[in-house]
Amino acid sequence: MIDLNASGAGLDGYALLAAQVQALFADERDFTANAAQFSAFVYHQIEDLNWAGFYINRDEQLVLGPFQGQVACVRIPFGKGVCGTAAATRQTQRVEDVHAFAGHIACDSASNSELVIPLIKEGRLVGVLDLDSPTVGRFSEADQAGLEQLAAIFLQLTDC
Ligand code: SME
């Protein structure tokens, strides 16, 4: 696991993760393969997560895609829950305490905070990247910026 607060010479934190994600996708552009790899990579490299994965846009509904973690709800309408809000607004949702978010959909009772990043390619909403943590307030502004950068690399290097 990478120390995201590390400092010193060379790449560290999210810069190192970004370089690793670029290497991970260097020879493959398939959506399912890259989404599966990406969710496994994020889940294992970023501390204190209990769920990491994708919901895919299928006709204005989010449908479960590749993920790591407990089994989850399969379909989320746009506008519902944290994921559906990210999809409808096309804005990242960084939720300090999911129990204070009206309409939050509890898939895993261990989740206490959540970060959902809309995945937009050439103006199309491909889906969302959803990360859950058992720790309230797990995701900082720096985490949001770092994970948005990783998601952008995924979109750039993947056919979708
Ligand atoms: N909590 C999400 C649902 C998906 S799970 O967290 C995997 C939501 O409110 O949209």
Image (spheres, rainbow, N blue to C red):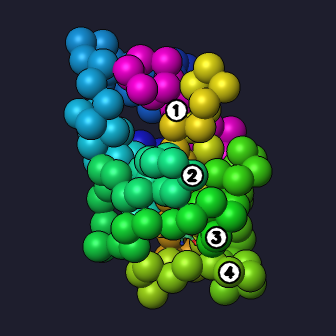
**Above or below — where is 90 with respect to 130?**
above
- Report helix, strand or loop for mark 1: helix
Task: Look at the numbered disc 4 and say if its residue's Cβ is closer than 8 Å to ligand 1.
Answer: yes
Determine whether label 3 and label 4 are within 8 Å by CB.
Answer: yes
| Residue at mark 4 | 103
The total of numbered circles placed on residues is 4
Amino acid found under the numbered disc labelled 1: Leu
Magenta-tinted stretch: 140-160
Task: Look at the numbered disc 3 and say if its residue's Cβ is closer than 8 Å to ligand 1.
Answer: yes
| Residue at mark 1 | 150
Determine whether label 2 and label 4 are within 8 Å by CB.
Answer: no
Amino acid found under the numbered disc labelled 3: Lys
Distance from the alpha carbon under mark 1 to that under mark 4: 27 Å
Distance from the alpha carbon under mark 2 to that under mark 4: 18 Å
- Report helix, strand or loop for mark 4: loop
**Above or below — where is 146 with respect to 62?**
above
Q: Earlier in the sequence, mark 1 or mark 2?
A: 2
Determine whether label 1 and label 4 are within 8 Å by CB.
Answer: no
Whether 153 is among the magenta residues is yes
Task: Look at the numbered disc 1 and say if its residue's Cβ is closer than 8 Å to ligand 1.
Answer: no
Query: Of circles 2 and 4, which is in front?
Result: 2
